[in-house]
Image: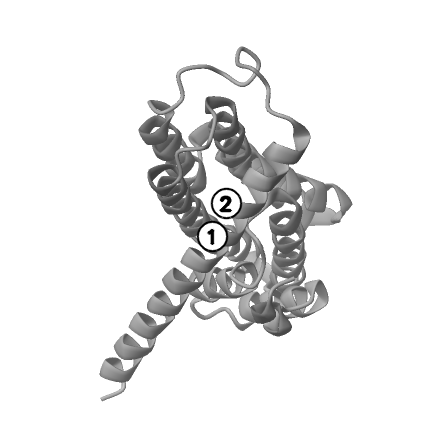
Amino acid sequence: MTEKNSNMLSTEEIKQAASTSVEGGVDIRAKVRDLTLRALKTRKLSTEEIRPVINAVTEGISVGAAKRAGEVKSALSEGLAGMDEALTKAAEATRLALEQLTSHAKDFSESELEWALVNLKRMEEEFLDTVSVVADSAAGKIKQELKDLVVHARRAGTDTGAKVAETVSTLGSKVSTTLHESKVVGKDAAREMSARLASLASGILAGMADALHEKAEKLKGKSGE
């Protein structure tokens, strides 16, 4: 863990904050986005650390939406849209980190780069799969609405998926072979590449999240004048 992780929100804190944001019914999308970014920026942007955040936020959204009576569908939709926005930023941070690594380091093999892209491609899948798991354990209207939203997202695509596709397309030209066709790197080398990428991307995301928060505060100040 890095030093900044002393500010890491626990999964229970994330769940509670997400629930409160949705239950309040005001600026749900923005609040969930900011909460998700706050949780992600203190973690490495790896699948293992992103998944618990998605799970906790989704559970919190579900709890909050259950208290919104006739607004369950819109509350869930806004909450998931906020999480999608945050994950889009995470994908963008990962792209910038990959570009930095590939431009400054010449010692990465094609298969290591492909490994990184494969992991990036999993971001949207992890998002929707985790929401599906939460839906399975939910009850009544929450369960059905969440499942419907996931089905729609898989069909129409998410902003996260679009950003990942753009990144893979942009960086894919650097990789002339696929992982299974190339000389597969050892687990240690792949793990080191993933760790470096996740750590660098986390730092970039923290900067993005802070800038977004600062911009929102300035707009809030202007509207209050």
Is residue 91 or residue 175 the one in the foreground?
175
Query: 10 Å neighbourhood of mark 1: few (<14), some, or many (≥20)?
Result: many
Mark 2 secondary-structure assignment = helix
Give me the disc on residue 34: none
- Report the amino acid beneath label 2: Leu
Kindly check if marks 1 and 2 are in contact, taking CB atoms under 8 A apart as contact.
Answer: yes
Disc marking residue 200: 1
Left or right: residue 51 versus residue 107 is right
Name the residue tied to disc 2: 197
* Residue at point 31%, 30% (across, down): 170
Q: What secondary structure is marked by label 1?
A: helix
Relative to 220, residue 188 above or below: above
Q: Position of residue 208 (x, y in %)?
A: 37, 61
Q: Nearer the viewer, residue 141 or 2?
A: 2
Q: Is residue 1 above or below residue 162?
A: below
- At x 42%, y 67%, the residue is 27
Point out residue 124 in the picture as x, y percentages from the top left corner: 52, 37
